[in-house]
Image: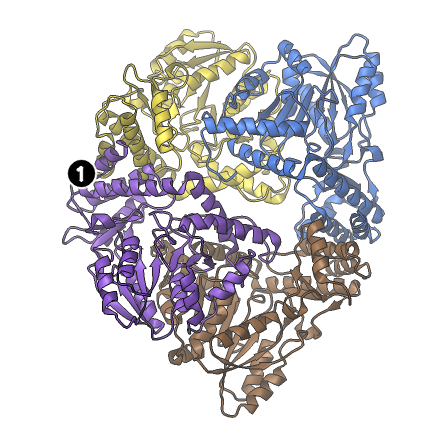
Chain colours: A purple, B brown, C yellow, D blue
Amino acid sequence: MAQPTIDHRGPDFAKLTLRIMDKLAPVFNTTSPILIFPASGTGAWESALLNTLSPGDKVLAFETGHFATLWKNIAEKLGLEVDWVTGDWRHGIDPGVVEEHLRADTQHQIKAVLAVHTETSTGATSRIKPIREAIDAANHPALYLVDTVSSLACSEYRHDDWGVDVTISGSQKGLMLPPGLCFNAVSEKALAANENSRFRHSYWCWKEMIAPNKNGYFPYTPGTNLLYGLDEALSMLHAEGMDCVIQRHARLAHATRLAVEGWGLEILCLNPEEYSNSLTAVVMPEGHDSDKLRQVILDRFNMSLGMGLGKVKGTVFRIGHLGDFNELMLAGSLAGVEMGLSLAGVPHRKGGVNAALGYLASL
Amino acid sequence: MAQPTIDHRGPDFAKLTLRIMDKLAPVFNTTSPILIFPASGTGAWESALLNTLSPGDKVLAFETGHFATLWKNIAEKLGLEVDWVTGDWRHGIDPGVVEEHLRADTQHQIKAVLAVHTETSTGATSRIKPIREAIDAANHPALYLVDTVSSLACSEYRHDDWGVDVTISGSQKGLMLPPGLCFNAVSEKALAANENSRFRHSYWCWKEMIAPNKNGYFPYTPGTNLLYGLDEALSMLHAEGMDCVIQRHARLAHATRLAVEGWGLEILCLNPEEYSNSLTAVVMPEGHDSDKLRQVILDRFNMSLGMGLGKVKGTVFRIGHLGDFNELMLAGSLAGVEMGLSLAGVPHRKGGVNAALGYLASL
Amino acid sequence: MAQPTIDHRGPDFAKLTLRIMDKLAPVFNTTSPILIFPASGTGAWESALLNTLSPGDKVLAFETGHFATLWKNIAEKLGLEVDWVTGDWRHGIDPGVVEEHLRADTQHQIKAVLAVHTETSTGATSRIKPIREAIDAANHPALYLVDTVSSLACSEYRHDDWGVDVTISGSQKGLMLPPGLCFNAVSEKALAANENSRFRHSYWCWKEMIAPNKNGYFPYTPGTNLLYGLDEALSMLHAEGMDCVIQRHARLAHATRLAVEGWGLEILCLNPEEYSNSLTAVVMPEGHDSDKLRQVILDRFNMSLGMGLGKVKGTVFRIGHLGDFNELMLAGSLAGVEMGLSLAGVPHRKGGVNAALGYLASL
Amino acid sequence: MAQPTIDHRGPDFAKLTLRIMDKLAPVFNTTSPILIFPASGTGAWESALLNTLSPGDKVLAFETGHFATLWKNIAEKLGLEVDWVTGDWRHGIDPGVVEEHLRADTQHQIKAVLAVHTETSTGATSRIKPIREAIDAANHPALYLVDTVSSLACSEYRHDDWGVDVTISGSQKGLMLPPGLCFNAVSEKALAANENSRFRHSYWCWKEMIAPNKNGYFPYTPGTNLLYGLDEALSMLHAEGMDCVIQRHARLAHATRLAVEGWGLEILCLNPEEYSNSLTAVVMPEGHDSDKLRQVILDRFNMSLGMGLGKVKGTVFRIGHLGDFNELMLAGSLAGVEMGLSLAGVPHRKGGVNAALGYLASL
C-alpha cells in the first residue's frame, strides 16, 4: 500500500483490478459480480438496499445485536418499512421465525430478508444456509441480503450455494486491511431487482460500476492503494488456503471459549451452533463494569479490547480473534484478559489461559 | 499510513481527529465544520446535494467541462432539476451569466448554484469570489456549492470570505494522499438548509457526522490509515506555509504555459484570468490524436499524462503540476512532452522546455 | 528507514549525526566519544582490540560462553596472547578471579581485561562494576573492554561511572534496529592507548572517525538508513525513559524465570545475581534435544527460539525478552514454549505461564 | 527492507542467501564465490588487500582520482609498499603504463595491480580488459584487484572473462540500495593467494565466510534487511535485463555529455573511450567555485550535486546518472544544472538540456 498511486485509467490498473476479481471470487464463493466501493462497510449496507428496493418497501430484519440495529436504522432512514423481530442479543436469527414470518406474508409484501452473518457486537453467527432453506420452505420470493463484514474469510461462507442475493462486506476484518473498501456480491436475482429499484442515488450505483469493472476500470476514482493491499492480502489467504484460514479461526475461537469457561465467565452467545469464529463476547459478573476492565487492560498492557456496544455497554467486553492472528497472539490476548480481570478485581477463576493452551497443544 | 490500524473508538484516535481538524481549517480558510467521509471525491458531490436540497429542487449549473457535467448528471440522477448553462469547455463560469440567471429567477426557484473551481478536464479555474458577488448582486438566496477537488491547496481558496456554503474536496490532489477521503466544509446557511432537506440517505448524513466529530469520533468506521496520512500531509503543507504552497503552484503553472507557448501549441483555457495552478490542458494540432501521443510518452518515458476526457477525448492532453511537485519534476515532465511530441511526429517548435527553464531561473 | 538515502556529505546529514550522538550518550551513560561503524557487532570487538593493543600483547579473558569464546578467537587471530580463564557456561565472570589474575601479573603484561556483559548464549550477566573494583583493587593498569551487544538498553550500564575503557555494542538488540551498526564508546585512557597501538588496519580506525564525527560527518560512507532508524529508536527509548526501559526488561525477565521454574526446568545461569534482563537460557531435561523442541515450536507456532550455541548445542534453548517487547508478547512466547514442551513430549509441569502471569498481574 | 528481521540461523534465511547468490553471479559475470560483508564499500577494499597479500608486499596502483588515492592510502596504512603512478585526474589507467611497469619488475615483486574501474571523483572509467591484456603481455603473475563500486550494474563488467582476481563493490550505487553491504568476488587464484596471506584480521576473513555461505549462512550477523532489499533489487535488474540496464546507463550518460557540451563547459575526463556510464564530472570555468554553484542549486531546487573531491574541490561538480534513473529524471537534473548555472552567474551557453533531449528523442 506504500507504493505510489498509479493512474486508475491506465492499463496496469486494469490488470490489477481483474487479478483482484479472480482472487475475490473464491473468498465469497461466487461466480457473480463483486462490486468494490471506496467506502467503509456501512456504505455496503446502504448500497445493497438502495440498489434492490424502492421507498416504502417492506423488509424483514432481526435484532441480533448492535450492528443489525444500525442496519435497520439505515433502512428506516431510507424510507423502508422494517418488520423488526426483536431479540435478546444472545442468539442469531432463528430460521423457524424467518419461515413463520414469510409464510404469514401471503401478499409477498416483504421484499427482502436482512441477515447479519456474524454480529460483531455479540459474537453470534446466524446460520445463513438454514435461513435460506426457511425462505425456500415458505416459498417466498424475498431477496436475501447478508452482512458478512466480520465473518468473511473467518467463517465458511458460500454466496452462490446458499442462495444469497447480496453479500455485504468490508476490508478491515478477515481481509486484514485498513478500513476503506466495501463490497457487494450480487446475484442474478438482485440484478433483476435493481432494474426496478426507484431509489435516487449515484455513488452506490451498481450498473455504472459493473460495466467498466468488466474491463478492469471504475466509474470514479477507486481506493487505489487499498486495492494494492487487497491484491496482496488475497494472495496471502490463498497461499494459506481458504479452508485452512477458516479452520485456524475456528481453532482460535474454540480456545478462546475454553478460556472464558476456565475463568468461570459467561459467553454472551447462548447457542453453541452460533458461536463465532471471529470474536467472543464475554458477560461481566453482575456489578462489574466492562469499560473499567478495558481501561485497566489498556493502561497496563496496551491492549484495546472491544467495548460493549449499544444495549450491552458496560456489561460485555469482546475478544477479537480474526484476521492475521495466530496461536501465540491469542495467548497474549487471553493473558492480558486474565491479568486484567485480576488487576480490576473482577471475580473469576484462574486457569483460562491454561485451558486454551491445553486445547491448542492437544491438536 | 503504514502504521497499524488503531481503535477508532479509543482516546488516541480522538486526539488525531481533533488535530487534523485544527490543521484542515486554514486549508479551507473556514471556521465552519469540515466533514471527512471515507469515500472518493465523487461522494462529496452527492453528499453536498443530498444534505442541502430536496427532490425536485432546481439548481443552476455550468458546463465548464467533464467533471461539471458528471456532477450535473449526479444531480439529475438524484431527481434535481438542473438549469444547465452550456459552455465551450474553454472557459470558467462567467459571473455575469450567473447574475443574469439569478435575476431572472424572481421566484427564487433556484435553490443552489453549483460551481467547479478548477475543472480538471480543461484546466480552467472559475472565479469563485466574483461569482459570489454576482449572487449577491442578484440578491438571490441560493446556496453556493463549490467543488475544489483539484484546486484545494493549489490555488487560493477562502470558504468563509467568499461566502461558499458547501466546499467539496478530496484527498488525492493538493493534499498529496491516495484517494479515499472526501470533504464537505459547510456554512451555517448550509446547516440550516440541511434541516429542511427531504432526501433519503444515511452514509452521507451530516448531522450524524458533526455530533461525534466534535469529540474526535466518527459515526461509523473512518478511513483510519488515510487519516494518519492526512495528519502528516497537513503538517507538510503548514511547514512550507499555505501561501508558499500556492505560490509554488502558480510558478510551476506559469512555467508550464510558457512551455506550451514555446511549442507553438494552444492552451485549452482561453481566459488568462482562469488559468489553473493545478494542471494545464493542451490542444493537439488538427489531425493529431492526443491518445497516440500519450501512449508514445508512456511507452518511452514511463510518464502517464492526463487524457482528454469526454468531449475533448483525443484532442487534448493534460499536464499535471500539483501536489508534491517542484521545479525539477516539472522540468522532467515538460522534457517528456517535448520529446514525445517529436517522437510521435506532432508538429511543434522546440524550445518549450527552454522557455520554462528561462522563466524559473529568472525568479 | 524507508526514507530516501540523503547525501552524507550534506548539512542535513550532519544535523542527524549530532542529534544521534546527543541521544546515544545517556544510553551508554558516557560523555566520551561513541563511534558508530557501518558493520555488525562482531566488527566492534575487532575494532576495540585493533585500536588499543599491539600484536603480541597479552589480554585476560573469561570463558563465560559462546560469544566470549568467539571474541577470544578473534583476539588470537589478531595475534594477541590470551590468558583464558575457562568456565562452565553457567556463571558470569568472578571478580575475585579477575583480581587474583591481575595481582599475579606483577609485570603488568596484561594489557586489557575482556568482559562480556550479558553472554547471549547463556543468559549470564557479568557484574561490570565489581570487576572494575577488582581491577582497581589489584592496582593494575590494564584497559577494561566490555561487550554490551545484548545488554545495552536492557540492563543498567554506566560506561563512565564503572570505569570502562571501551564499550562494544550493536544495533540489533536493545536498540531495536536491524543489524548493521556497531559501536565503540572510548575513554580517555583508551584514546591514549590508541596512540601506541601498532596494529595495521583502516576501516576500524578511531582517529579518522572521531575527527569528522565532531562536525557530524564520517570518514567513509556510513549506514545512512540505519542511522535514520537509530534516531527514531533513541527517541522511543527516551520517550519511555531509560530507567523505565530497564525496569520493563527486569520485570519481563523475572516473569520468564518464574515460568521456567513453573515448568520444573532449570535455568542455565546458576547465580541469581547474574540473571540477564535480555534473555533466559533453559536447560533441557536429560535425553531431550532442544533443537527438536525448537523445530516443533517453529513448525506449529511460527516462533523461532534461540538455539543452544557451541558447547550447549542441543541441551539448551533460549527465550529472548529484549527490545520492543511487552507483557503480552512475553505471554505469547511463554505460551509457545509451554505448548511446545507438551507437543514435543518433554517432561515438564504445567503452570509456567500461570506463574509468570501471576507475577505480572501482582505488580 | 521494512519487513521484520528474521533469524539468520533459520532455514528461510538460507533460502534467501542462496537465491541472492544465484542472482548476483550474472551481475558480476562470474562463477566464483561472491562474498557479502555487512559494511560499506571501503571495507571491501581492505578485505581484498588483507586476504590476498602480506605486510610489506608491493602493489602497483594508479592515481586516477580521489578514490584511487584513498585506496592507496589504505594499502599504505596496512603496511603495503605502493608503486604509485601519479596522474592528472582526467584519465583512466593507461594499459601501456601497466605493461611497462610490470615488464620492469623482473623479480615479480609486485604482488597485485590495483585498478579502480569507474573513478567516482572524475567520471573516468579505466579499461579493465585491456589492462588484463597488458598484465598478460608482460607475463606477470600479479593479482588483479578491481574496484567496481560505482560501475557495477552501470557499465559492462566481466569478472571471469576479464581475468579479475578480486572484484570490489558496494550496495549503494548500481544496486540501488542504501549503503551497508560490500562485496568481494574472488577468483581461484585469489583464493590460492589467500592461503599464504599473513595479515592479522578476522571480520574480513574470506575462509570463514565462504564455508557457511555454501549453505546459505554467515559466520556472524549479516545485514539482514539490506539483504531483503538486495533480493528485490536484483530481481528488478534481471526483469529489465542486465544488457538493457547497461544500455540505459550508456544512453543517459551520452545525453549528459551532450548537455555539458551544449553549455560550453568541459568534461573532466579527457579520453572519450573512458567516459563513465555512472556519472559525469564537469569542470567549472576559471574563477568560478563549484561549491557555490552546488549551494545555489541545493537551495533553489533541492538537488544535491556531487562535490569536487580532493584535488578538484571547488573546480569540479559531478552529475550522477546511475541506479534507478531514467530519461525524465535526467532531464530534471540537467534542468537544475542549467538553471543553477544561470542563477549562480556562471558563464555558459543555453541549450544543454535541449541537446540532451534532442539526442534522447532521436533514439
Please say if A215 is above or below C361: below
Identify residue for label 1.
A350
Residue D225, image x, y percentages: 52, 34
Q: Residue at x 54, y 71 (%)?
A: B147
Residue C363, image x, y percentages: 23, 39
Q: Of C283 and A180, which appears nearest the observer? A: A180
Q: Residue at x 63, y 68 (%)?
A: B310
Output the chain of dot 1. A
Give the tally of numbered discs.
Answer: 1
Residue D112, image x, y percentages: 73, 16
Task: Determine the image quadrant of residue C272.
Answer: top left
| Residue D41 appears left or right of C189 | right
Determine if residue B146 is in view.
yes
Please identify the residue farthest to the bottom as the structure is shown.
B106
What crowding class fits label 1: few (fewer than 14 Cα within 10 Å), some (14-19), or many (20 or more)? some
Type of amino acid under label 1: Lys
Q: Of C298 and D338, which appears nearest the observer? A: C298
| Residue D63 appears left or right of B329 | right
Task: Determine the image quadrant of residue A330.
Answer: top left
Residue C128, image x, y percentages: 38, 23
Please say if B235 is above or below D317: below
Q: Of D132 and A105, which appears nearest the observer? A: A105
Please say if D198 is above or below D360: above
- SS at mark 1 in the image: loop
Determine if residue B25 is in view.
no
